[in-house]
Image (cartoon, rainbow, N blue to C red):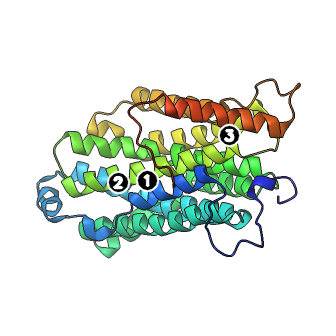
Amino acid sequence: MNRQEPRLRDNKDRFVIFPVKHNDIWDAYKAIEANFWTSADVNINKDLENWKDLNEEKRLFLHKVIGLILHSEHNLNGKSTRQLGKNIKLPEAKSFFDLQSVMENTHTETYGIFLNSFLNSTEQEQIFKEIEAFPATAAREEWIKKWTNSASFAKKLVAVATAKSIFSYSSFATIFWVKNCGLLPGLSYTYEMIYRDKALHRDFVTHLFRDHLLEDISDKKVQQIIGEAVAIEKEVIFNFLPLELIGLTAKALNEYLDYESNRLFTDLMMNRSIEEESLNKETLLEQRAQKLSKNTNNTSNKISKKTD
């Protein structure tokens, strides 16, 4: 990877992070640092009261949702982050992924607090056995192995961006139903925090792919990676979660997943095919960076996080 991706190559003469060499990557790190939170920030007292008032069907639904997301966080998201982090030597990017791993530990801890508060050990064991036995669970794990172990760094980046969105957002959509009902404020707050974190993680990987990657990858291959994940996630959501219990239609969630997959593809491929035949890649990357800078400067409602 070092030979193919000089912008992500480590400089062995850099013993400290300053002076920062890649301000855009460092700014992304400072953004997630500023949004760091811990499980101690979450108050679940009201949730415990609400839980007693829920009927058995809605409790079962939440059992499955929380269990499914906790399983995904432990077996999919954490693995994909660690796998990608092994390949990146650039200090600014390593800082981001190191902190991301800590944040994902916080996510797992907080999921565990809710699950442990709502379910006894027998109920937890039953939910996880059901998740493990579900065919699409194995398909998810195979998908992660297939793409994050790829020799292509471009494919790894697409896979991680996809895992951070497609394998998370559909479950989050069901939790937002809970918030709209005015129930479980601690759980709702937690998922807002985690949703924001996932978006920052996804956007960072997308940025690396779009503005720092030299490796060629076809539109068709990117579509394949995302499309496989969407098909698996639809199988999970439509056949594992009892959506009818909360009045969420399969059609609405199907449209949402299609929207997210199209948005991810667009974000990844933006500017990657501009006059590639007539420009060498270094020049092309410089043009992309200039365009991104101009777009940022013209957006008046964005907060500047310039390192200087």
- Which residue is at the front of the view, 263 or 50? 263
* C-alpha span from label 2 to label 3: 26 Å
Disc 1 marks a residue whose amino acid type is Asp
| Residue 159 placement, left or right of 217 | left
Residue picked out by circle 2: 193
Residue 200 x/y as whole percent: 48, 49
Residue 233 x/y as whole percent: 53, 43
User: Which label sits on residue 44?
Assistant: none
| Residue 262 placement, left or right of 237 | right
Residue at (24% x, 45% y) in the render = 178
Circle 1: is it few (<14), some (14-19), or many (20+) Cα within 10 Å?
Answer: many
Vertical arrangement, residue 79 with respect to residue 256, above or below: below
Q: Are marks 2 and 1 in contact (CB under 8 Å)?
A: yes
| Residue 125 placement, left or right of 73 | left
Q: Quadrant of residue 138?
A: bottom right
Circle 2: is it few (<14), some (14-19), or many (20+) Cα within 10 Å?
Answer: some
Residue picked out by circle 3: 210
- Which residue is at the front of the view, 47 or 123? 47
User: Which label sits on residue 197?
Assistant: 1
Residue 84 x/y as whole percent: 67, 60
Disc 2 marks a residue whose amino acid type is Met
Residue at (38% x, 46% y) in the render = 172
User: Does residue 138 appear in this view?
Assistant: yes
Vertical arrangement, residue 46 with respect to residue 215, above or below: below
| Residue 194 placement, left or right of 213 | left
- Which residue is at the front of the view, 273 or 264? 273
- Which residue is at the front of the view, 92 or 204? 92
Residue 271 x/y as whole percent: 69, 29
Query: Please, what secondary structure does the residue beneath circle 3 have?
Result: helix
Front of the two marks 1 and 3: 3
Circle nearer the N terminus (1, 3): 1
